[in-house]
Every structure is written in C-alpha cells, then in structure tokens.
Image (tube, rainbow, N blue to C red):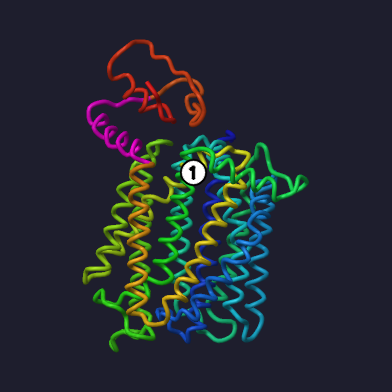
Amino acid sequence: MPSHKAARLRLVALGAAVAAYAAAIAVVGTFSLELVQGGDYGAYRPAVLTPWLLLSALPVLIVSPLIAAVARTAWPRVVLLFSTVAALLIVGWGYVTPGAPWLSVAGVASLPAAVFGATVLALLPVAAAAARWRLPSVLTGIAFALLGGFLLGFVLGIGGSGGGQPPLGGHYAVVLLALAGFAGLGVQFPVSEPSSLAGGWVRPYLSGIRDALRHRRARNGLFGLWLWGFFAIATVVALARLVGDSGHPAPAGGLQREAEPPETPAVAKTVWLAVGVLGGVVLAGVRRHPYRHAWLIPGAATLGLVGILWLRFGEAWRGPLIAIGLALGASFTPLVNAYLTWTTPRHHGAAAGVLVAGWCGIAVALAAILWAFGGDPTAARASLLNLLIVVGGIAAIGAWLAFLRPAVEGTAEIIVRIMYRVRAFGPDVEKLPVRGPVLVIGNHAAWLDPLWLAQILPGPITP
C-alpha cells in the first residue's frame, strides 16, 4: 500500500480515538456534575460549578510546560496510549470504589485528557503531510470527531449518575476509553524535529511562546482561540443554565415547568448549541484553501455577537444558541489552522501547550467570575450576558481587523469560481509551501494573473 494511503488509514484511527476519548471525558464530566447536584444537571449553583472548573483546569495549568514537552515527541503513539491508560485507571478507580468522589475523578482525568489533546494537536500537521491532504481538511475531520464525541458523551452522561454502583456513566466511560486505546494503537506518524526532555521543559516552552507571538497570523490565531474558548466554556457551563424556556431567567434552583423533567431545558439548549457547532464546522470545511480557510471568521464573530445580543434583549433561546454554535463551529478550525500553519513546526508541541494553558486560565477566570456573580440566576444571567457582549464586541472588531484579507479573497473566489475553473497540475504540486518566501513566475502577463495564481497557491500572494 502506498505510504500516503496507509497514513490516511492511520488518520481515520486517530479520528476514532479522538471521538471515543472526547465522549468518555464528556460522560464523566456530565454525570459527575449531575451527581453532585442531586440529579439536576440544569441547576445553576456556583458553589458546585466553581470547584468543578477549578479541579479540571488548575492541575493542567500548573503542568502545562511539561505537557508541551511531551506533546511533540518521536513516539506520539506511546504518549497517546499512556494518556489513555492513565485516564482509564483514574476512571477505573472510581468505577470500583463505592461512593467514589466522581467530581474529583473528573477533575483528575482532565490532566491525561490535556496531554492527549495537545499531542493530537501537535501531530495533525505531520499527519496531514503524510496523508497528502490539506491541513484544513484534516482539521475539519478531527474537529467533527471531537465535537461529535463530546455531544455523544453528553447525551450518554445525562442520567448516568443512576444505575447503582458503579453508576451507569462509569460503564460508558470505561468502554469508551478502552475503544480510544484500541484505536490509538493504529496511530503512528514520523515526527521531524521531535522535542526531548533532556534539554529541560521550561526553556522550550518559553521559546514556543515567543515563536507563537512573533508571527502576526499565528498570534491572531492564538488570541482568537483564547476568545473562542471563553465563549465556549461560558456558554456550555453557565449560559445554558441561566436561560429559561422563554428566554427569561430560569427560576432559582434550576426548576422548570412541572410538565418537564428539571434537566430537560438545559439539555435541550446544550444539544441545540452542539448542533449549531457541528453545522459551523461543516460550513467552514467547504473552503479547504490553507489561507482562505479563515474567510468566515469575521462573519462568524459578528454572528456570535448577534446571538448574544439576541439572548440579552430577545425572548427566544433556540435561535440565538444555534447562531452562537454556528459562530463557534465556523471559526474553530480556521483559527487552529492559522495558529498551526504560521507556527514553526518544531514548536508545535509548545504551541499546543500554550493553547491548553490559555483555555485552563480562562476556565479559572470564569470560575472566579461565576463566584462573584453570586447564586441569583436573574442577576447572574444579566451580568454574564453583559460580559459576553463586551468580549464579543472585542472579538468581532479583532476578527475584521485580523482576517479581513482572507474574507475578501474568499468572497472574490466565489465569483471567480462561477466563471472559471482553475486547477494546478504537475509533480510535487501538493508540496508547495504554505508559509515562507516563494517566488512564482507566470508564463504570460495578464491583469487577472494574481487571481488565477491565488486559486492554486496555498499561501497568500503579493503580485
């Protein structure tokens, strides 16, 4: 079998491992939160949500330099299997221990999950090159597996606190982690310039931070992903619990109408949000050009701001949450693509560690914010939406400033595609570099040559 076809099969195995691992973590996180809230997943209780966020984020934040060091080793399969086995042992301990503190189990399990996620993120550019696929295409597939796994785990986790000892969610998590480990056996890609712990792990981490901040496009991707993480965490953890059926604040304690189970509205809102995110991922994946893959980011950021304003001043919740989900999904893979593409490959492990550390810092900050807002759902809802409006406005303005060119080029490409079909042929055409200086000479002169060349060259061009 040709090497690139074998690499594609290994990419499928990687996607299966990501989906199963994400589903397992979502199961544990969902039913542990449901368990500690007395079976009411949709209740808004900052006294529970705050320690849940802190337990999940603080350990990862503390050891993020070490995570960055092991995320790009010469043996990615070993790291993936080790992190899967570690999560299986942690969940397995809760599985066999009567009365296990599942909230603590979920928090500790986030540590190997962060190692797994950072390793996958650092491995994706290598895997895309080995499979001879464009990085945006690979990112779209992995993102769909990741988010689909989270949605599956969330659905399985609702009601997972029942079933006696061990709880039903524990059964699901153990099986899913075992499937993730089995799929991970088929993942192996050659890594160029792997990192090593022999040179320490703090200095390479700092070098990776400098590299990520040095290039403008990588810096834009990193800051955009941090803002994306704030919106995603705030929406899933808090906002879905604070908006009632009619768009008004949910009553204290999370109780809804008597005709429905108390957790049904929060579950429905989370599912609709996830559907919007998956739709946004598919929409962004239609444009696979390495540079113009980011063409939807400004529009997505604007749509997300509109969704927040709609929630703040409107009566509905389904439409705004779908809009926010579409915005999150349509901007996720383009931001990751920009971040990885314009970061030096040997620093991809550190880049993954920096991204994970930023998300964990955001989770810690959000825990403090929810604690400061207090337990009154009405006041907390208004305060959180006002904060999201401010952050969303900053994100929308920054998106238009940072990604205006790919947005304009992507729009112009639609017009060009209606009239002309421009294709590239020849040896090693798939090896044209995305970043760095490249001199391209056309065989004739025409006013529209830059438009034709822009269709086939992976990087941005300067005529």
- Point out residue 323 in the picture as x, y percentages from the top left corner: 29, 59
Q: Is residue 313 above or below residue 46?
A: above
Q: Taking 429 as reference, is 60 left or right?
A: right
Q: Taking 257 as reference, is 2 left or right?
A: right
- Identify the main secondary structure in magenta: helix
On-image quarter of the N terminus? top right
- What residue is disc 1 on? 219
Occupied quadrant, residue 416: top left
Name the foreground residue: 317 vs 374.
374
Residue shown at 36%/27% (left/top)? 454
Boundaries of the magenta span:
403-423
Name the foreground residue: 257 vs 22.
257
On-image quarter of the C terminus? top left
Q: Is residue 462 above or below residue 251?
A: above
Residue shown at 49%/22% (left/top)? 438
Residue shown at 54%/46% (left/top)? 11
Q: Is residue 15 above or below residue 383?
A: above
How many marks on residues?
Answer: 1
Badge 1 amino acid: Arg
Q: Which SS class for mark 1?
A: helix
Residue shown at 62%/47% (left/top)? 349
- Point out residue 322 in the picture as x, y percentages from the top left corner: 30, 61
